[in-house]
Image (tube, rainbow, N blue to C red):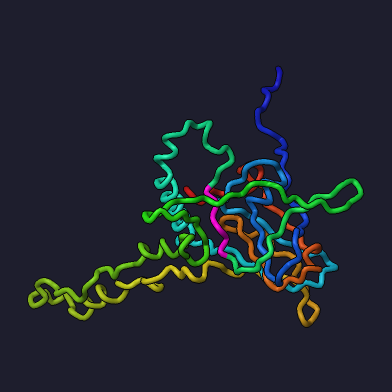
């Protein structure tokens, strides 16, 4: 009896790792990786920014670097801020989209936002190799930021940094609607029939209403000024101990910030993206 043929693919072609480089002399010791850009350039496919990319950084054993690695916080505020910005973008451009046929809208457009990293940060690019082993940097590709026009007619983009006259701060805008209210808002309430019900204790009644009616965090801010969280420190410690790999970590929007790295050490840093079902990599959507 002939065996039933399986339609399941045994291999998905995707480049998930590369060396790193830069195109211009670094202005300092801070660098940024943008996973959607790297994977788009490595695989010649559109990889969207609004994803939770899983990746890891590794230093060569010969590296002299001592670096710190940061990513956007993987929390509800970051996710909801991105979703809110995306929906505002789609609403703001809805009339124009309705005037265009699907074939007239830019094929590789995406809701791309600014990283919000400090001025002077150097962008790292993916690196392939030729047949002699020489580095070949991948630098070509269009990565335009999403634009909207506000009520005053000013064209603005979106950013994970602080907002400005020409940029909407994603977390700053979300912060305006994300405050948590006390629940219940006013305490204590009088207990009914307390004078005739010997089992009702007024102090306990007040405790149940008032202790826990405020959230276990700052109810008035989503910490919009501190969007990044530290992943790891890589390098050789003062006692000779080494930590050369971050292990896999989640990078919302694929943004990875590296501080304390000298230009000479960039060539000793490598990145790998976890295998998964989004075009070959693990990157769940931030819009779901």
Mainly helix, strand or loop, the magenta region?
loop
Q: Nearer the viewer, residue 239 or 251?
A: 251
Residue at x-position 74% and y-position 53%: 126
Q: Is residue 170 visible?
A: no
Between 137 and 71, the one nearer to me in the picture:
137
Q: Position of residue 6 (x, y in %)?
A: 67, 27
**Residues in magenta?**
111-116
The residue most toward the right is 132
Q: Residue at x 18, y 78 (%)?
A: 201
Quarter in which the N terminus is drawn: top right
* 206 lies left or right of 268: left
Tell me if residue 270 comes above or below residue 275 in the rendering: below
Residue 279 in the image: state x and y as whole percent: 64, 41
Considering only vertical position in the picture, is 45 above or below 210? Answer: above
Count every numbered label the image shows and give the total: 0
Magenta stretch contains residue 113: yes
**Front in this rendered view, residue 26 or 67:** 26
Q: Position of residue 11 (x, y in %)?
A: 72, 37
């Amino acid at each position: 009896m002939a065996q039933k043929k399986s339609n399941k693919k045994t291999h998905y072609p995707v480049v998930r790792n590369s060396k790193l480089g830069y195109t211009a002399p670094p202005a300092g010791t801070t660098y940024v990786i943008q996973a959607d850009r790297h994977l788009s350039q490595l695989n010649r496919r559109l990889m969207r920014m609004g994803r939770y990319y899983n990746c890891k950084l590794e230093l060569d054993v010969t590296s002299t670097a001592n670096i710190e690695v940061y990513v956007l916080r993987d929390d509800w505020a970051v996710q909801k801020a991105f979703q809110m910005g995306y929906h505002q973008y789609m609403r703001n451009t809805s009339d124009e989209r309705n005037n265009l046929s699907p074939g007239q809208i830019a094929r590789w457009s995406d809701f791309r936002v600014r990283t919000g990293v400090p001025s002077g940060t150097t962008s790292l690019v993916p690196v392939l190799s030729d047949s002699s082993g020489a580095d070949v940097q991948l630098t070509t590709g269009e990565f335009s930021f999403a634009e909207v026009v506000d009520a005053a007619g000013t064209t603005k983009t979106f950013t994970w940094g602080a907002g400005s006259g020409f940029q909407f701060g994603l977390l700053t805008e979300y912060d305006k609607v994300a405050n948590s209210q006390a629940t219940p808002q006013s305490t204590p309430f009088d207990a009914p029939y307390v004078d005739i019900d010997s089992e009702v204790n007024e102090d306990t009644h007040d405790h149940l209403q008032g202790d826990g009616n405020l959230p276990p965090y700052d109810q008035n801010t989503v910490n919009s000024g501190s969007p990044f969280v530290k992943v790891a420190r890589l390098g050789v410690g003062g006692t000779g101990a080494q930590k050369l790999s971050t292990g896999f970590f989640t990078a919302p929007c694929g943004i990875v910030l590296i501080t304390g790295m000298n230009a000479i050490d960039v060539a000793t840093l490598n990145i790998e993206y976890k295998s998964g079902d989004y075009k070959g990599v693990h990157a769940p959507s931030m819009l779901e």
